Image (tube, helix red, strand yellow):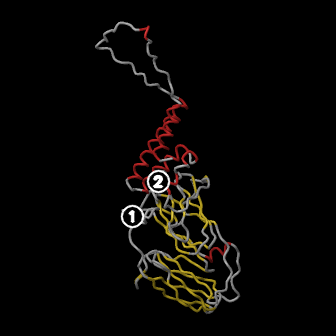
Amino acid sequence: MTIRTAAHAVLLAATSTLACGGPGKAGPTDKKPEAKPAPTAAKPDTKPVVSGPIGEKAATLREAASLLEKAAQTLADGNKSLAEQQFSFAEQLVGVESLAAVAPMFREGAPPRVTTPTQKIDTSAPAQPKVAGNSEVEDEKDKVPPPPQVGSLSGTLQIDGKTANAFGLITLEPASGKYKARTPKRVVMEQRGREFLPNLVAVSVGSTIAFPNFDTVFHNVFSTSPTGAFDLGLYKAGEAREFTFTKEGIIRIGCNLHSNMSAYIAVVAAPAYVVTDGQGAFSFRRLAPGKYKLKAWSVKSKAPITQDVTIKVGPNTVNVGVAADAPAGPLPDKFGGKRG
């Protein structure tokens, strides 16, 4: 089935509910003398008027058919991202099942789609913080006891030798490579005010993140990251979908409808991690003494750097530097297309 055939089928479904009879033709024996038409008489409007639930349904189907036709033309013009958006809005009108046969034509090349039903959310919930992620805060909530001997570590993350002026991430793992995996959590990254909150969140491997929409417009959260590619599709205010992150890595997410929206998810395997503040400051307060491998990254960096640190009983300090080598500009759309 072609795209245009699908659009025609929807339009046919709409018009089939509006069938009406027309005047019959006169037979050979019914021939009458021609009558001159009255020059000022207006022709009556013979278009049927359908109201109520049937009329509303017909109007919805016609709108869906129009969107499908536009999506087909947009796809033919080479704009895959806009074509998929138009197709998705048609799905909102008539249901996913109705258009399943042609969906692959619009979604080929996009990340794997999450098709689980949306969940209702409490729209009166307070906003999430700007950044989030601290393994020690989690341990305190879970009443995990501190080590018998305790060392602390504080420091500043610098970018290109200067004050960071951006958020970042610090992780620590024992140099031996032996440690217990953290328990996965369920956290929230919301869409509010046409931005993601938190804008950076750190979670342990296996954690699930819910993405509720608190705005009055649709959003389409996605990521093309190899360590966590997904496409949540369209959903409106008061709804949420979620995704479970099973691989370690830095994942940048965006909204396919709003190019200004982007955020970062740091999926961490290390037993200790913390998100820095806006000036790069960070601290750990309950570390077991010993040798560690420290990894550092900022939202302006391509990839984490690694350095060795030794933690002694009591206070310890360290300064860490990363590069501002990440590409500038908006995140490409979910098909990899450039956005302004």
Q: Mark on residue 84?
A: 2
- Going 56% across and 60% down the picture, which residue do you hit? 211
Q: Position of residue 42 (x, y in %)?
A: 34, 17
What amino acid is labelled 1 in the image?
Lys
| Disc 1 target residue | 338
Q: Mark on residue 124?
A: none
Q: Position of residue 271 (x, y in %)?
A: 63, 80
Secondary structure at numbered mark 2: helix
Cα distance between the residues tagged 1 and 2 = 15 Å
- Going 40% across and 21% down the picture, which residue do you hit? 45
The image quadrant of residue 122 is bottom right
Of the numbered discs 1 and 2, the one sitting upstream in the chain is 2
User: Residue placed farthest to the left in the image?
Assistant: 39
What amino acid is labelled 2 in the image?
Glu
The image quadrant of residue 327 is bottom left
Front-most of residues 174 and 157: 174
Would you say the residues marked 1 and 2 are in contact, meaning their CB atoms lie under 8 Å apart?
A: no
